[in-house]
Amino acid sequence: MIWAVPSKGRAGKVTTLKVTPFAVLFVPEYEVDDYRRCHPEADVRAVPAEIKGITKTRNWILDNVDDDDVVMVDDDARQCGWCKMHSEKVEHLKLKPDVWLREAEKLFEITRSLKYRLWGVATQAAPRSVYPYKPILFRSYVTASCCGICRESGIRFDESFPVKEDYEINLRCVVEDGGVVAARHLYWSNSHWHDDGGCKDYRTQKMEKEAIDRLKQKYPSMVRRVKRGKSDWSIDLVF
């Protein structure tokens, strides 16, 4: 199993290593020295400079690792853990690195037993909305903030989507496979727009709007555009 962390322009700011120190950083080749200097304990691997954008980077990673179990996570993890129910109450707990590995192994096993290709962890900004009453859902959303991909299946991200690529692969798996494995007893929250670097450097409102419109055309009745907070780029998936 490999935990792959695409990163760009965030040398010294990768918070995900605090949660999963065993993760591998995949960075543009011209930034490798910066990342290795700032994160001397990390495994840093170079992505060719001609590979531009997060979607192509994700596919390059899938095409250039040997592991069939690929966990793709964002580099800006903020609050991650799991939910435990006891006495009618839900308790949110942090997970140790070895437990993340164990949980991922279980999720890959469940995914393959169902002949699915994708699993994911709840990536809501508010962990209080995650609960263990239904720990696994099969028709739900997963995002590439924390998802597992069965690489040997040959599934790849659609490179015609420079953004919202994880929503597209999620919907494609639901349509083609019948579902995904969505772990709702775990959560993985990120900083996203609060930090410079990464996708923030190139994604625009026009790019987001076009991607949303294409998703709605490709998967009619499964995509609903919503306004969430100050963002006009949010969508809900309807199952």
Image (cartoon, rainbow, N blue to C red):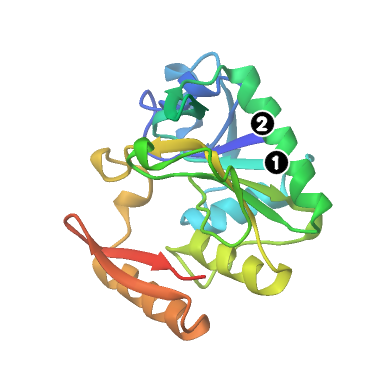
Residue extending farthest left: 230
Question: Residue shown at 75%/58% (left/top)?
Answer: 116
Q: Quadrant of the N terminus?
A: top right
Measuring 55% from the left and 58% from the top, which residue is drawn there?
Answer: 56
Q: Are marks 1 and 2 in contact (CB under 8 Å)?
A: yes
Task: Give the camera-side residue of 51 and 197.
Answer: 197
Is 143 left or right of 12, judged from the image as shown? right
- The structure residue drawn at horizontal position 72% and vertical position 46%, both measured from the top left corner, is 64
* Location of residue 80 with respect to 172 vertically, above or below: above
Q: Is residue 168 visible?
A: yes
Q: Picture coordinates of residue 17 (x, y %)?
A: 49, 23
Location of mark 2 (residue): 103
Q: Which of the two residues, 205 or 57, is positioned nearer the viewer here? A: 205
* Residue 131 image point, x, y percent: 47, 39
Q: Residues within 10 Å of mark 2 (few under 14, many from 20)?
A: some
Kindly state the secondary structure of the residue where label 1 is placed. helix
Query: Which residue does the image show at 50% across and 31% down from the upper left?
Result: 32
Q: Amino acid at mark 2?
A: Glu
The residue to which callout 1 is attached is 107
Image spot of residue 55 (x, y percent): 52, 58
Q: Find the distance from the CA under tag 1 to the CA under tag 2.
A: 6 Å
Q: Secondary structure at mark 2?
A: helix
Query: Where's residue 148, x and y in %?
Result: 65, 45
Q: Residues within 10 Å of mark 1 (few under 14, many from 20)?
A: many
Between 77 and 82, the one nearer to me in the picture: 82
Q: Is residue 34 visible?
A: no
**Location of residue 102 with respect to 112 vertically, above or below:** above
Amino acid found under the numbered disc labelled 1 = Leu
Mark identifier at residue 116: none
In the orientation shown, which residue stands out farthest toward the front?
87
